[in-house]
Each structure stands twice: as C-alpha cells, then as structure tokens.
Amino acid sequence: MPWTDACATGDIDAEDLIRFDRGGATYAIYHGADGKFYATAGLCTHENVHLCDGLVLDFMIECPKHNGQFDYRTGEAKRAPVCVNLKTFPVKVEDNRVLIEVP
Amino acid sequence: MGKRDYSLFGADAKQAVESGLTAAEWYHSDLPRKTMKDLMARGDSPAIRDTLLLYGLMIAFAATGTALWPTWWSVPFWLAYGVLYGSASDSRWHECSHGTAFRTPWMNNAVYEIASFMIMRNSATWCWSHARHHSETYIVGRDPEIAVMRPPEMTKLMLNFFGIIDVIRFFPTLIQNALAGPTAAERTFVPQSEWAKVRRVAQVHLAIYAATLVLAVWAGSILPLMVIGLPRIYGAWHHVMTGLLQHGGLADNVIDHRLNSRTVLMNPVSRFIYWNMNYHVEHHMFPMVPYHALPRLHEAIKADLPAPNRSIAGAFREMWPALRRQLTYEDYFVKRDLPATAKPYREDFHQYVPGMTAPKAAE
Ligand code: FES
C-alpha cells in the first residue's frame, strides 16, 4: 500500500485526533499520549459515527455517540457498546509530515 | 400517524428502519473543538466527593432509621434513605453507564453495579438498552426506554411514582434472566456475547433478594426489606418525577433533541439526586460531557436551544396538559420556540412527525 501524506505534525494537538478523508474512505489520525502518531479507521464499529468528535483519554479513543472505547494503538474494542475492533494503519513521520499507509 | 406500536418487533419499528429514521444524523449545536474538549475532560474528584456524600448519607439515614425502628420517629429517616436508594441510584446508574462520572474505569463500574442493583435493572442488559435510547431517542418501536407512551397510561404513570409497575415487571424478568438469560425483546439489543453475563448478574441480584427475604422471615420483621428492596418503592418518586420531564409531552420520531428533550432548571438538592440530568437536551446532544460539566455546556449552547423550564413545577405545567391532550389526540406534542439566535428546526428532517410541518404547539 502506498504512503499518503495526511497532515503536518503540528495539525494535531497533543492527545487529540483529526479526521482525514481519502478515496471515499475516512480515517482518524491521533497524536498519542506518548507523543507518537497513530491511525485507525475513522468510523466507530458500533454505529458508524465519526470518531474525530470523540475524546482521547491516554491511549483510548472514546466514541462521541455511546462512549464506547478503543485502544487506538491496536484498535482493540475496550468498552461496551463497541464489540468489533477498529482497523489500524501504519504511520510514519517525515519532515514534520504525518504519513499513513492506506489503500 | 394513527396508533403507535411501541413493540420492538412491531410495524412502527419496521417503518422507522425503512424510512431511514434510524440511520439519520442528529442535529448538534456548533461548538469549537477546543471548547468541547474542555467540556468533555474527565476527572475523579467531583464524583468521588458526591459518591462519598451519597453513601455516607445513606448509611447515616439507614442507621438512624434502624435505631428508631419501629417508632414513627424513624419515618423521616426512611423517606430520606429511600430517595437516595430509589432515585439517586437512577442517576448514578445512568451516568456510570456512560462511563463519564469518573475518569477511572473501575470506579465507574463499581458505582454502576451498585446503582443497577438498587434501581432494579440488570447491569448487563440496561447499558445496551440505553445505547439504543441514545441512538434512537423516542423513535417509536426502536427506543426501549420510552417512559411516556401515547396515549399516556395515566394510572400506570401514577403507580410508578411508587415504583409499582417497575417492580412488578422486574421480578419475573429477573427470574427469567437468571434461568435463561435475556428475554426475546432484550435479545434485539443485547449482543449474544453478553447473554451469559445477563444471566450471571440476574443470579447475583436474585441471591441478594432471597437472602434479605430469608433474614426478614427469620427475624419476623420487615426491617431488612426497608434497607434492601422496599426503598425502590417508597423512594422512587423523585426519579419518576424528574424522569417524566425528560421527554414527556414532546415530539417523537424526530432527529433533533431540541424537539424531544427538555432542560429544566432545578433546586440544588434535586440536582444532587439527579446528578444534573435536568440538562437533558445538552446531555443527549453531547453524551460525552460528564454530569459536572453540564451547567457549563448549557451556558455554551443555550443560544441554540429552546429556553429551559424555570422549575420542576413549571415543567409539569407545560407537560401535564400535553399528556392529557394526548389521551384523545395522540399526535399532539409541545413544540417549544427557539430563540432568534438558534439554528431553526429543519422541518424537512421531520416530515415523519404528524403536525411537524404545521405544528400544534402548546400555547
Ligand atoms: S456509535 Fe460508537 S459507541 Fe455507539
């Protein structure tokens, strides 16, 4: 899969996320609690709500609709009502740009 | 629209799915991300303070009631204990089911389990029904938590001020859950992976009630039941009073919480018991915001909301005539005016609701 330039490192506050749309798909890109960047699918697996309006709590992303939680490093569903894991994507940082490897 | 069918398997449920109502995007007031993040921020301190106060008061009231038992002097203490057991548990159950009360997950879970027991709800079932209530608030046939159906059943509403209907329904379901897991209706919103948990929780609750009953029979006194079980009846009135106001008399089958939910300004004691859920439009619009930040959220978006009712009595004065009118005309609802600063209701969103294009709002 090709690397896609998604945003500048400064575009995402510490412990926050943004939405990134490309090719009809939507992704969430995180600036994690450890200072690293992560990427997951952009929609909650429970009811397809955009996670970008949610809350980053340490390494969790909490969905804005029913407060389901995922670990955004692994995509693992951590708190009901989410049961299905979130897809994750590789991320690298080059020259202060965040690149994600997505289809 | 004709007669409403509230069954989760009924014609209205089917129509809601087919019309796209269940998949529609709900209206949200605009707030800058930075403000939202600030409002959503979690902490343990407010809920620890409130929980220590709640449990401390419950222990003090129950101990004094027991010490004065069986004299009439014990009555005020049981009444106070009852409201905390049979009503404050509803708001604790609610906030902790969202996971927003505490930042620390085990604290949320512990208070959630205790509150679920006191309010007589299976903790493994009700978090799912509440998720549906948030996705499809007051969508007929889809929302399993519609407190006031149309036409309103006034006798049942009155009986529930004493928890009568809830308790009568609870025990057969509890036994069924303990023996076979969720009921058929519950299986429509509880995923199969949770069915065993529903059963386990029901068995624990049943065991506690059985032990309390055995103790009462052995002691030849209802005192153990005054502490466990009965307060769900004699202390239910406050959560029923506030709960009816959440959506009663307002629109159904809409996708704008400003039309189907009510914010009511209340006295501080009621707000402690109700854990700020009087800011109900705000809570439904932004369920990520913890209870202690709801007054700030209200200030931030009030220019986009109908004016709140100024008191519990004022809210009943708005709701009660609407419920009475729904006895003969089911499609009637109160449509509140928006301030000039608000984004208008999107009438095209709400064609499904009879009267929405030519509103029959309360005068
Ligand atoms: S839509 Fe994300 S938890 Fe329900």
Image (spheres, coloured by chain):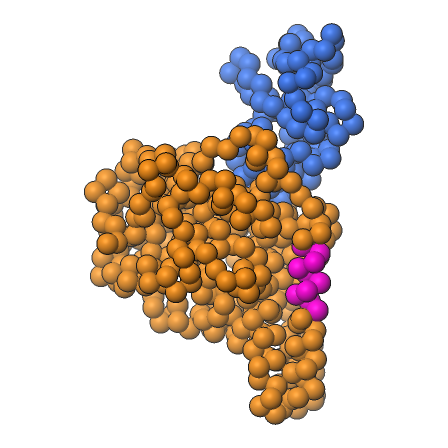
Q: Residue at x 54, y 39 (%)?
A: A65
Q: Nearer the viewer, residue B269 or B54?
A: B269
Q: Which chain is blue?
A: A
Q: Residue at x 67, y 71 (%)?
A: B57
Relative to B198, does residue B158 appear above or below in the rendering?
below
* Residue B330 showing in the rendered view: yes
Q: Residue at x 25, y 60 (%)?
A: B325
Residue B49 included in the magenta stretch of the image: yes
Question: Image check: B112 left or right of B265?
Answer: right
Q: Residue at x 66, y 7 (%)?
A: A2
Q: What is the span of residues highlighted in magenta in the rendered image?
A: B47-56
Residue A10 position within the rendered picture, expressed as x and y whole percent measured from the top left: 68, 17
Chain B is shown in which shade? Answer: orange
Residue B268 position within the rendered picture, expressed as x and y whole percent measured from the top left: 54, 62
Q: Nearer the viewer, residue B67 or B105?
A: B67
Question: Image check: B130 left or right of B70?
Answer: left
Relative to B117, does residue A73 appear above or below in the rendering?
above
In this view, the residue farthest toward the right is: A34
Residue B76 position within the rendered picture, expressed as x and y whole percent measured from the top left: 57, 81
Relative to B221, does residue B174 appear above or below in the rendering?
above
Q: Quadrant of the C terminus of chain B?
A: bottom left
Residue A76 position within the rendered picture, expressed as x and y whole percent measured from the top left: 70, 34
* Residue A88 showing in the rendered view: no
Residue B133 included in the magenta stretch of the image: no
Question: Image check: B158 left or right of B178?
Answer: left
Relative to B143, does residue B159 appear above or below in the rendering?
below
